[in-house]
Image (cartoon, rainbow, N blue to C red):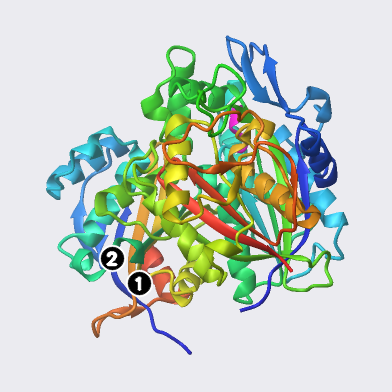
Amino acid sequence: MQTERYITRSSRIRGYSIYLNSKLIYGKSPTAPGDFLNQAYQDFHINYPKFHKMDNMSKLGLLASEILLKDQLYKTRYQPYEMGVLLMNASASLDTDIKYYKTVSEIPSPALFVYTLPNIVIGEICIRNNFKGENAFFVFKQFDATFMAQYVTNLFENNDLEACLCGWVELLEENFEAMMLLVEKSGSSDAMAFSKENINKIYGEENG
Amino acid sequence: MREVFVASDNIFSPLGRDSAVNFEQLQIGRSGIRQHHKSKTSAHSFYASLFQDEVFDPGSTYTKFEQALIYSIEDALKRTRLDARDDKTIFILSSTKGNISLLESGELDNGVREKITLHHSASLIANRFGFIHQPIVVSHACISGLLAIITGMRMLQRGLYKHAIIAGADIITRFVLSGFHSFQAISPEPCKPFDANRKGITLGEGASTVILSVDANMGKSDVQIRSGSVTNDANHISGPSRTGDELHHAIRQAMEGAEIGASDIDFISAHGTATLYNDDMEARAINLSKLEHVPVNSLKGCYGHTLGAAGLIESVVSIHSLRQNLLIPTVGFSEIGTVEPIQVIDKMQSREMSTCLKTASGFGGCNAAMVIVKE
């Protein structure tokens, strides 16, 4: 029995540009990652004060998820345990690890230490949206669409989930990029099938 | 869905170098927790379960973290018929902080940045053993080890691979200890899970490996990993759920997946970190799951909190508990102190057993539950 699953929305943050469903919707000239993320938060009118205490990686992940989920009806469509989050990256939480360790010789900062785990960005997205289903953070040298497709498909086939937010949230010092997909069991006529090929297409589109 | 057997396992800890030795030490009530005075790690003395320095080769090209993993995997592999180069084998690594100690060495050039990444350690280890496929690294706070086993189980159940080598480790460094101290989460004495006088976490070092296979002839085949489930509290990034409902949901899903009821569970291997809030949350979840009469242990009093290795070490101990029909007591516990009653195992007990529920919870609001069954 083959159940179809669809990528119903996608967001992509790369090269100081933001894409929604592969369309460029926002662009800025290069600046510090934190400044870019704060500016985008303002420009997209995201009203969530907790954003300001997050580390850069959580800000990046939260921003990508806000753009992805904006104006969507998923909150009425799905129960909290039906929504899952799968995220991956290459550098885990190294960006904040470095910042935290600089505080250790003076007064170690608990506010930074809590962000020295890569899955905290998942926790932040779950808190924001009241998602309570399956969640997992994996580390790969490079973006791995095959694993993403396998893992999420497995959760759907097991009836663990009705919808899943999955993506890549990578940030280390000056370099950052994110991609986030909303995967659902049904989609409109223009929704893409949730497949390795289509994930790679969305991830790689801006490469030209 | 395919049956997934525990073909082999290892615990490499301050209590011993293989699972059998570790289990013997637990049976005589040993704990790896000692008081340490290590100025490199902390300005003040602290309690932790740490490896002795001479266990590792300072001249090795591998770090202490990687050496612990290599030793653990090697020992587990030699107890199977598995060919590491088999193309139906997947390697899954679990860790929270991996080689973070390299941050403490001072220089932070690109080479050091690369060596700190978990995928780098995973590749080194995969090359060392000749694993063919790109390794999968789970880094999901304190549920990492359990999530790694659940991930391997799922991949095998779905037929993506036939064998999974799942290994986890964490090393206690200044980075980790200072962080938990900054949270005021470190106990001033060896931790006391579920106890009325519990005062927080004691940290520990360790590595552990579980080898899963759908082939009953690869190694042992008397114990299976049946099902697993993961949930999120969606409440707070560094504090557990107030209700325990989310861990309860993971427990319920795992029990449904294994097609078992509350009366089938012989014991629970809980997370039991000995913080006030974690242990209360677990007690609530256990009561919500109607498992308040089921014996519960926490192994944090023996191993400390071994972070990314904890779910693996505690699962391996539980597997051996099922095999030997022995319930391991909760070292450090003397008087129940949770908000709701649970049956904490306080002395060694021998009884026929077939089913264990393993749970874990961690920062980021994550919870995991897994069902282990002896046939």
Q: Is residue B206 left or right of residue A33?
A: right
Residue stretch in magenta: B98-102
**Considering only vertical position in the picture, is B282 above or below A151?**
above
Between B205 and A89, the residue placed more toward the observer is B205
Which residue is labeled 2 in the image? A79
Quadrant of the image occupied by residue B272? top right
Q: Decide which of tag 2 and tag 1 comes sooner along the chain.
A: 2
> Is residue B99 covered in magenta?
yes
**What amino acid does circle 1 point to?**
Glu
Residue A136, percent across and down?
47, 55
Q: Nearer the viewer, mark 2 or mark 1?
A: 2
Q: Is residue A21 left or right of residue A118?
A: left
Asked whether the beta carbons under mark 2 and mark 1 sit within 8 Å of each other, the answer is yes
Q: Is residue A92 left or right of residue B75?
A: left
Identify the chain of the residue marked 1, using the numbered disc in the image.
A
In the structure shown, which secondary structural element does the residue marked by tag 1 occupy? loop
Find residue B123 and name its label.
Answer: none
